[in-house]
């Protein structure tokens, strides 16, 4: 596979990511309407940001490859906006866990690593990427902690999906020109996204099989 | 230490008590709701007022004291709550 083919595949993956993120956001939003839950509101906000971020980054990638003729808006603006929204999404995801940490009156170990991860780079894109990576790793740790308490297999699925995304992300920074590493990181991201989609599928099937009276 | 409960969880607990303890069909008294809901009297009376106002609980005015039973709307809320609780739990969150 050529390097350009890989970049094309990676950018197509951004649209898959956007679809998964918006699906999760939609289910969460329905949950907010039905139960007025603030946790689901934060989850919906997180995945709306993530989905929009993925979309913008996908358009940025297609813009650099000149896949869409005449698509020549400011690519830097697209990239930074996409990365910013993605970081905001991961922040909201981590923030929900941080609130649990505060309410449970325990210390989040990962919070202590924040300054190390966030201020060791100067470029805005690298800072945003570092922040996103930190938030997603924080999400993984807290989701695993939640699994240790609730023993819900779905929680373990989500933790492994987030782990694969984080690992894929980290590998993409390290891959450089290696085609093999690029393919591996793409596969990790793809599987991670599919795993994140499992609760949406499970929820949809559960709703179909149960009597639904209507909104509160 | 008792685990932290969100407001939504406390409401679900009250509605579950009103549903499960209403065996005779005459409703559940505030004492039973207090015992199972594990919140203070002041907070419980405010919550009950809100739940009755939202149509999730029905107030039955009997001779001695008010009793409460879950409404159809309350049942819908509980169904939605348990489905979305599982969804939120998948992401390691409390509803």
Image: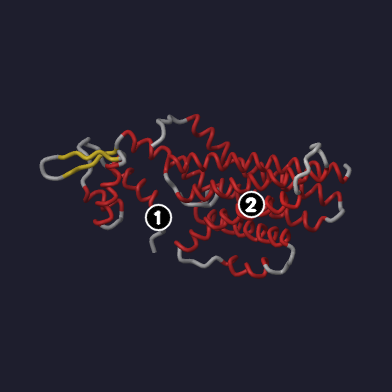
Measured along the vertical axis of the image, is residue B57 above or below residue A94?
Answer: above
At horizontal 42% and vertical 43% (from top left) the residue drawn is A35
Tell me which colouring the rendered structure shows. Answer: secondary structure
* Residue at the left extreme, as displayed: B63
Query: Quick check: B44 left or right of B1?
Result: left
Residue B91, given in percent of the width and then of the height, sits at: 55, 49
For mark 1, what is the residue? Answer: B5
For mark 2, what is the residue? Answer: A85
Residue A138, given in percent of the width and then of the height, sits at: 61, 60
Q: Residues within 10 Å of mark 2 (few under 14, many from 20)?
A: many
Between A130 and A199, the one lying in front of the other is A130
Between A84 and A13, the one lying in front of the other is A84
Quadrant showing the N terminus of chain A: top right
Q: Residues within 10 Å of mark 1 (few under 14, many from 20)?
A: some
1 and 2 marks on the same chain: no
Measured along the vertical axis of the image, is residue B54 above or below residue A142?
Answer: above
Chain letter belonging to callout 1? B
At horizontal 43% and vertical 29% (from top left) the residue drawn is A211
At horizontal 20% and vertical 42% (from top left) the residue drawn is B67
Q: Quadrant of residue A126?
A: bottom right
Kindly report which numbered mark, 1 or 2, lies closer to the viewer in this rendering. Answer: 2
Residue B92, given in percent of the width and then of the height, sits at: 53, 52
Regarding mark 2 in the picture, which secondary structure is present there? helix
Residue B7, given in percent of the width and then of the height, sits at: 38, 52
């Amino acid at each position: 596979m050529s390097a350009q083919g890989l970049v094309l595949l990676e950018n197509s993956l951004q649209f898959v990511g956007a679809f998964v993120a918006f699906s999760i956001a939609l289910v969460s939003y329905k949950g907010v309407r039905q139960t007025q839950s603030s946790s689901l509101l934060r989850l919906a906000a997180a995945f709306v940001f993530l989905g929009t971020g993925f979309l913008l980054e996908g358009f940025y990638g297609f813009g650099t490859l000149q896949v869409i003729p005449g698509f020549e808006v400011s690519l830097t603006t697209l990239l930074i906006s996409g990365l910013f929204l993605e970081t905001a999404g991961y922040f909201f995801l981590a923030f929900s866990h941080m609130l649990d940490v505060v309410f449970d009156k325990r210390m989040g170990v990962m919070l202590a690593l924040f300054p190390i991860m966030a201020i060791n780079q100067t470029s805005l894109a690298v800072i945003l990427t570092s922040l996103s990576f930190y938030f997603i790793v924080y999400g993984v740790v807290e989701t695993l902690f939640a699994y240790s308490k609730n023993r819900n297999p779905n929680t373990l699925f989500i933790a492994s999906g987030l782990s694969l995304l984080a690992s894929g992300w980290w590998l993409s920074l390290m891959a450089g020109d290696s085609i093999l590493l690029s393919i591996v990181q793409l596969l990790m991201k793809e599987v991670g996204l599919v795993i994140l989609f499992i609760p949406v599928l499970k929820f949809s099937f559960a709703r179909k099989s149960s009597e639904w009276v209507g909104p509160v | 230490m008792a685990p932290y409960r969100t407001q939504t969880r406390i409401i679900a607990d009250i509605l579950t008590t009103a549903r499960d303890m209403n065996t005779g069909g005459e409703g559940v008294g505030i004492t039973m709701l207090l015992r199972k809901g594990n919140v203070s009297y002041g907070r419980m009376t405010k919550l009950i007022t809100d739940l009755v106002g939202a149509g999730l609980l029905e107030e039955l005015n009997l001779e001695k004291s008010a009793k409460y039973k879950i409404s159809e709307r309350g049942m819908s809320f509980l169904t939605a709550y348990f489905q979305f609780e599982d969804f939120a739990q998948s992401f390691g969150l409390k509803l």
